[in-house]
Amino acid sequence: MTTQETETAPANAVAEAKQNRKGRVGARRAPVAPAKTKSGKRARRTASAPKRKQGGGAGRVSKGGTILELLKRSGGVTAKELIKTTGWQEHSVRGFLSSLRKRMGLKIVSTKAENGERSYGLEG
C-alpha cells in the first residue's frame, strides 16, 4: 500500500460504515394509530352451562318486596331488622327507602325510639 491508499482507506471505511448504518434503519412511518384488527371468535355458551332464567319467576320474593311487606306491619320495622333480612349495608337500606319515596311515591314514616334505634313504616 502506498501512502495515498492508506490515507483514503480509513475515509472509505468510515463512509462504508455510515452507509451500512443507514441501510439498517427502516423507513419512518406516519404517527397514527394502528388499524384495528378483527376480533377473534366470541365465546359461546356450551350445552352444559346452565341458562339463566328471565325474571323472578313464580314464588320468588325479591328483597325489595320483602322490605315492602315489612314496612306494612302495624309497628313498622327497625333499621337493624331490614339490614339483617336483606343482607345490605345500612346506607343501602336507607337509599332503597329513599327510592321508594321518590319513585313509587310512598309515604314512609321514620321514627327514633328512646333507645336510639330507628324504625320505618308506611303512612296510611
Image (cartoon, rainbow, N blue to C red):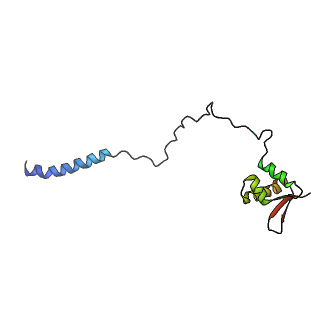
Extreme residue in the right direction = 124
Extreme residue in the left direction = 2
Q: Position of residue 73 (x, y in %)?
A: 87, 54
For the point 26% across and 47% down, the residue is: 19
Q: Is residue 33 left or right of residue 103?
A: left
Label tally:
0
Extreme residue in the front direction = 115
Give the quarter of the image for residue 101.
bottom right
For the point 46% across and 49% down, the residue is: 31
State which quarter of the image contains the C terminus: bottom right
Extreme residue in the bottom direction = 114
Q: Position of residue 39 (x, y in %)?
A: 54, 38
Q: Position of residue 1 (x, y in %)?
A: 7, 47
For the point 37% across and 45% down, the residue is: 27
Let me know if residue 101 appears in the view.
yes
Q: Is residue 23 above or below residue 96?
A: above
Q: Is residue 104 above or below residue 42?
A: below
For the point 81% across and 48% down, the residue is: 65
Which is more toward the observer, 22 or 121? Answer: 121
Let me know if residue 105 appears in the view.
no
Q: Position of residue 22 (x, y in %)?
A: 30, 47
Which is more toward the observer, 6 or 82? Answer: 82
Q: Is residue 46 above or below residue 99?
A: above
